[in-house]
Amino acid sequence: MYINRALLLIAGIAFILFPMIEEWISHSGSQWYRPYQIWLLIIIAAYWNQRSRSSDEL
């Protein structure tokens, strides 16, 4: 199974930075929509990664 190198790199960086990201999201004075911004970035990144593939590769 082929794993995209960029996706693997992003997953590794997210794993390393997870404690800092979790603290940033759950900060008591933050906006209520901050976790949704993170999910939106993840969805956009997944779309950007998949849009260049042809339908035969899926």
Image (cartoon, rainbow, N blue to C red):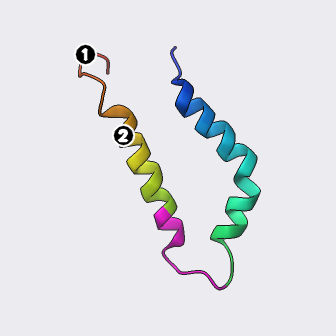
Of 1 and 49, the residue lying toward us: 49
- Label 2 secondary element: helix
Judge left or right: residue 49 versus residue 8.
Answer: left
Q: Distance from label 2 to label 1 (Cα)?
A: 17 Å
- Badge 1 is on which residue? 56
Q: What stretch is highlighted in magenta?
A: 29-37
- Horizontal side of 34 relative to 13 (left or right) equals left
Pointer 2 residue: 48
Residue 39 against residue 49 in the figure, above or below: below
Q: Position of residue 40 (x, y in %)?
A: 42, 58
Quadrant of the image occupied by residue 23: bottom right
Mark 1, secondary structure of its residue: loop
Amino acid identity at mark 1: Asp
- In percent of width and height, residue 33 lies at 48, 75
Q: Does the magenta stretch include residue 33?
A: yes
Say few, some or many: other residues with alpha carbon within 10 Å of mark 2 (under 14 / 14 to 19 / 20 or more): few
Q: Is residue 34 above or below residue 4?
A: below
Under mark 2, the amino acid is Trp
- Please give the name of the residue rendered at 75% of the width and 45% of the height, measured from the top-left corner: 16
